[in-house]
Each structure stands twice: as structure tokens, then as C-alpha cells.
Image: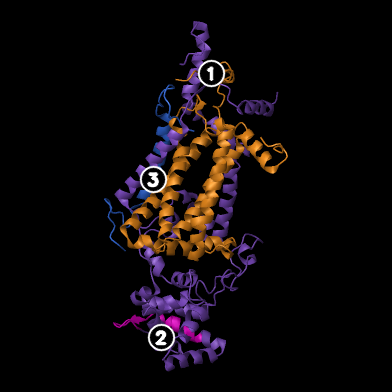
Chain colours: A blue, B purple, C orange
Amino acid sequence: MRPVAAIFNLNHPAHTVHWHFFQMSVSNIVVIVLMLAVFVIAILAPFPGHRQGGGGS
Amino acid sequence: MTRRERRVQEDARYREWRGAYRPYDLVKEASIALGVVLALAVGLTILFSSPDDPPSTIKQWSRTNPVDFVTTATTELDGSSGTGGYGPPYNHASSGQHIAFIYLQKWLGVSHPIDTARDYVLAPLRSIAGQPALQAAVTRYQAAPVDKQAAWASAYENGLGKAKTNPDGSISVPAGNYGPLPTMMGGLLSFAQAGGLDGALLTSRQFFQTDYTKPLLLMADGSVLADRAQAQHLLGDQWGMMNETGSYPGQVWLWLYTFWYQIKPFSTSANADILVMAVMGVLSLALILIPFLPGIRDIPRWIPIYRIIWRNHYRALDQHAVEPLHGAPEGASP
Amino acid sequence: MSVAGERSWTGRVREHAVAALPPEKLLPDKQPSYVASWIYVFGVLSLASLAVLILSGTILTLKGPQWWHFTGVGHFFNSLHLWSVELFFFFMVIHLWGKYWMAAWRGGRARVWITGAITFLVAIPCALTGYVSQQNFDAQWISTQAKDAMNSAGIGAFFNLTNFGQMYSFHVLLLPAAVVAIVVAHILLVRKHGVVPPLEWREMAAKAQSPERTETSA
């Protein structure tokens, strides 16, 4: 395997969170939390006014 | 008017918006989105790169854990390995998993036949040239009655439980009634350690091959892959289906697939896979059909997150309801 | 206009297509006033992620499946491909959440929801065939484990996860083509039916849909 030029080397066994039978890697938890956060922010964040373009669908 | 009729009427009003519009640049928006995603993907690549743990090989396995390799090979010989007893699509050793009377695994048949004794032990040994003692051992094994073969294999497996690895990579087993097995397995071990078994299993059908089923199943029958997987939190009971090697984010979208395997009755069932597939099949269908599922389709109304999403719209409605009373000009925006 | 226009198959297809999606609906330059929330950008972000996925995947096919193991450039494009998968699912699921809480299937838009859900469900095996095509330890492990689920349902009889050649073909051609086809149908349906109006919170919402209320452009 070629050495990988990355700023953060993630090639070490993952830290995991254990709770009863629930087990998840910290990286996956970060992704899930990010998704929830982005969803909430997307709903709450003010959207540019009506006169401007760049809306979505 | 019944509630259903009111709902149908309301739904008809949703078909077409006849209210206000505002300018919108679709192509510009798509271009911006493409730029944003490219920037994110390139950024994540520069920050984290991607994992690439090199594959295990039978050569490595037989060198680093020869006892496990020989034990696995012996179980292939007597058919007691995972693959040996698997059933379809590899053989008829079992009917496979089922739900009640539905035996999909059996009904779809043996499409990738593997005779573990022949494919993993006897054929590779027969391909080794210039070793008459080894060939004689194989001949003696093949000529023996089935119960004798089984007795030798069973005794050898017991002996392997107390086996030692020698400095030269071979193994030593306590004395026992193993017949020709020590010679055969010694020959197979040398062959594997030289890299011959990787190639032989891959090209057993023809020169050009892209089907790695045989070598992969042999490795999966032993502990080489599972040991690495455990270290990387990839085992089933580690919710491994969701994980990636290293500390990379994995397949988060598989959370519900792996969840079922953690709880009863799935966690203790011999038919866990088909049961989970059935549950997920039903839930997937339900996801597709949400518009038609009473209750599920009504939750967005009961938990009105929509009032936050469309708060500007509702506020504008309120103001327009009020404005005419205050004489504000028609068509003014809020 | 051809004299045989209405009778020929081509003419009828053209008329049907233009009736369902006239140019101003296919490429509109205005949108309903209620489309004013950041939750609305996740559809196009999912689409953009799919585009980057396909672009990076195309580069990977140029040099064959082993290239990325042995060169830095190859590894770079593999990383792009992997992160755009993560971004694709990230944005697509948020898009799904948003559309669910908006009950976006209303007003005859059930097929929009259906095609969206099917896209998600087809993307999952598409990703799986990618993971088992990596030709590294991860691919070895995933293929030998997931094969049990496939085999249990009889799918393993014709869809062999440990057969690299088959999995690579599915991953590079068949499943992305399926995803793209369903996504195209999904988008055309959105263009045809329009973005779903807000739920009627009070009766005045019904009044909002009066033809006189059309803003002048900015």
C-alpha cells in the first residue's frame, strides 16, 4: 500500500462508542450528528429575501 | 362533507399553485451546487484521503497462521467447514435458510458448485508435480472407504488443536492415527506458502478469471479475515456493516439493516439473514408507498415541522389577510 | 409541422412530451414564492453529488480497477469517489427528511415520492457493488459477509458478490444507469408537477392561490 498523503491520517482502528448492545464508530456518529444538525439549520436558517434569486427546489 | 371528501378536495388544491411566483435561475443554482460539492469532495480528499488496507492472501495466511490454515483445509476435506455445510448456491449439504415453508436459498439452486474436498485439497495436491510420496498419500486417501477418511480427518482435527508451528513454517501435531493426512496437509501447506494455492484456486476453470469465489470462501472458512475484521470493528455484532476500515466514516445508511441483527429473535436465529432481508424488504416497500399509508403519511401534519419550513409563506398570508383592512396597495410584498 | 404529425409515432411522442413538459416548465425561470428555505437546496446538492460521483468514477474506469492502488493520482480520484458517495447519501437523506416533513407527495405527486424512494433503495446496492469491487481487504470482508444475506434470499444464485468481474460490471454500468434513469424520471416529474405547495394551515392558505396575486419580477 502506498503511503497516503492526507493531512489527517485516519488509518488507525476506530474509536467506538458502546452502550448496551449499541456500538458505533465515532466517525459514523459524527456523520449522523452532522446530518441532524444540517437538517435543523436548513429549516431554521433565514433564507435570502424575495427580491434575490438563487432559491432551490 | 366527510373527512375523506375534505381531504380529496384539499389535495386537489395542491395540484397546481396559482399564487405568487418569483424569479429563479435554475442553471445557475445547479452550477453553484456542483461547485460546492466539488469543493467539499476535494476538501475532504485533501484532509482525509481514503482507506486501502491490502487484501489478505492464502500465501500470507498459511505463513502467519499455518495451524489455522491446515485446520481449515482439513475441514474442507471432510466437508465440515462453513462452505462444506453451506448448501446452495455452492452445494446440497443443507437446504439453507428459510422462512416458514419458503426456502428461497434452496429453490434458486446450486449455481456455483464447490466440492470442498476436491476443489480445496485433492485437485490442488494432484497438480503438484515431482513429489511421488505426496501423490501416493493422495492415492491412499482416495482409495480408502468413506468412514476411514472421516475417522482420519476427525482425529487429525483433534490433533491440530494441540499443534505447534515450527520455525520453518511447517506444523507438528501430536502422534495419532491420521493416515495419509499429515503428508497431504504438509504438501498443501508448502504449496500454499509458496503462493501456488492462490493461483490454483483462481484459475482452476480457465486462464482468464475474474471470479474470486473459491479463494475467498476458503479464507472466510478460516480466521484470517475475521481476525482482521475484529480489529477493525467490522464484525456483525460490532455493527460492522456500517463501518469502514480505519477511522473513516462508513455506510451510515445501513444502520437499520445491521440493527436487526443485534436483537432477538434475529441475533440467535439460524435464519437471521433471510429474516432481516424480509423485514427490510417490507420496510423498503413501506418507504416507497408512504403516500398511501394512513397514519405514516399523516405524521407531518401532526408534528408540524412544515410550519417552520414555510413560516415566511404563512406570515405573508397573515399580512395579506390584515393588509386590505389597512388599505395597503394590492400586490405589495411583505 | 408534418402533415402526418398526429398519426406518426414520432409526432405523438413529441406532442405528448411537449404537452407534459413545455420548455418553460422544463427550464423555468421562476418558482413559487413559498420555495424560500434552505431545505430546498438538498435535492440539487444530491444531484450535484451524483454528478461528481459519476465523473470521478469515470476517471477511475479509464485506467482500470487496479490503478488506484499503485499511484497517488489514482488514489486521489478514488478518495474523491468515496467522499462523493458519503456526500450523496448525506444530502439525499436530508432531502428525503425534508420532503417527508413537507408531505411532498400531495397534489398528485405520489410518483415523485416513489421515484425518490426507489433512487435511494437502488443506490444502496450500487454502493455495495462498489465496495466489493475495491480489490482490498474491505472488499474481501464485505463480499464474504454480505454474500450470506444474498444467498439466504436466493439472490446469490445469480448475483455473486465474490465474483469481481460481475460486481464490477454491475457497479460501473448497470446500477449507475439504473440510478440515473430513476433520477431523471424523478426530476422530470418534479418539473411536471411543480414543487408541492405548503400545507393549508388555515383557510386563508386557500385564498393565497388567487390568480390576481402574481408578483412582478425584481
Tell me which segment is drawn in magenta. Answer: B151-170
Residue at the disc numbered 3: A31
Where is residue A24? Give x, y as percent.
Answer: 39, 51
Count of marks overlaid on the render: 3
In this view, B90 is above or below B324: below
Q: Nearer the viewer, residue B70 or C127?
A: C127
Q: Which residue is identified by label 1?
A: C214
User: Image height check: is B263 above or below C207?
Assistant: below
Name which residue lies at 46% across and 85% down: B127
| Circles 1 and 3 in contact, beta carbons < 8 Å | no
Q: CA distance from mark 1 to mark 2?
A: 86 Å
Q: Chain of mark 2?
A: B
Q: Is residue B109 left or right of residue B182?
A: right
SS at mark 2 in the image: helix
Q: CA distance from mark 1 to mark 3?
A: 42 Å
Q: Which residue is mark 2?
A: B187
- What residue type is disc 2 on? Gly
- Quick check: can you spot residue A18? no
